[in-house]
Image: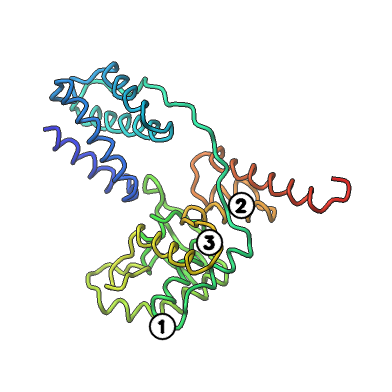
Amino acid sequence: MIDHQVDLYMQYLAVEKRVSHHTLDHYYSDLEQFIAFMLSEARTSFSEITHIDVRTFVGRMALHREKKTIARKISALRSFFSFLRREGFVETNPAKGVHLPKLERRLPGFLYLDAVERLMNAPDTSTWLGLRDKALLELLYASGVRVSECVGLDVSDLDLDVGAAIVFGKGAKERYVLLGAPAVNALRRYLSDAWPLLRQKGAGEERPLFLNHKGTRLSDRSVRRILDKYVVQLAGMQKVSPHMLRHTFATHLLDHGADLRVVQELLGHASLSSTQIYTHTTREHLERVYTKAHPRA
């Protein structure tokens, strides 16, 4: 019964909530750890779990885990027991009253424009995969989409005449994102010169936008490997993740005068507070420029 309930929950996250594979893996790992704990405490059903059990589990984890990891585990348990309660498997949510540890808000890392230009120009566009990588990098930087949103795109989600795309974000929320001219041009060339040739190797009714060498949908892990390859290729470049390109997108927009609420909409943030962290990044940047350039700074 325990495994069945976990499977139902994971299916709910994947199908209804459309969470990323990365998040699914973390939540599944968190639940496995909690199940091991509850079995060690002679609990054989989730309905037996109390608030004290959850606090005990969190206390043990806190001995050798970072606060961010503990916060995620609590969030995973809250969400899981909320699902079980809604489905009638338990009467209460024992994780609801467990407080999240206070986290320090780290300023997001971002790339300066010269580094972005180097990265965008790194792929060898004389090859199929180079054309794909060029289009992929340009889209990530131009739109600020999450990597899960990027790999989830189908060809039909693009409107290159308008310069926009439809993405499905967290909670299956649909939103429009905008694409600049470099991204549109890179996508047009990829779709005309590389996509049909890569697609010959694949099959199925789906038409994924970004394909791997087998002609099937690119995974988020593959996107990270692609970025790692170009970072190694570009001597002296800092470690770059897909999320850093998202941070860079937001930071550059605000640096050039974009309205905070517009950036919130483009990023797909439910709360403005999630977007406001980028104002701290741009403020630090302004202070550095001022200090360096002003004769009386």
Give coordinates of residue 241: x percent, y percent.
Answer: 47, 55
Secondary structure of residue under mark 2: helix
Residue at (53% x, 33% y) in the render: 104
Q: In this view, does 278 lie to the left or right of 288?
A: left
Q: In this view, does 194 lie to the left or right of 234?
A: left
Q: Nearer the viewer, residue 285 or 275?
A: 285
- Tell me which label, 3 or 2, sits earlier in the chain: 3
CB within 8 Å, label 1 to label 2: no
Quickly name the residue at label 1. Answer: 193
Return the residue found at the far right: 296
Quickly name the residue at label 2. Answer: 251
In the depicted structure, whether residue 82 falls above or below residue 195: above
Return the residue found at the far top: 52
Residue at (26% x, 32% y) in the render: 83
Q: What residue type is labelled 2?
A: Thr
How dense is the environment of label 3, judged by Cα within 10 Å: few (below 14), some, or many (20 and up)?
Answer: many
Give coordinates of residue 243: x percent, y percent.
Answer: 48, 53
Find residue 273 and report its image quarter. top right
Q: Nearer the viewer, residue 178 or 285?
A: 285
Q: In which quarter of the image is the N terminus?
A: top left
In the depicted structure, whether residue 21 falls above or below residue 233: above
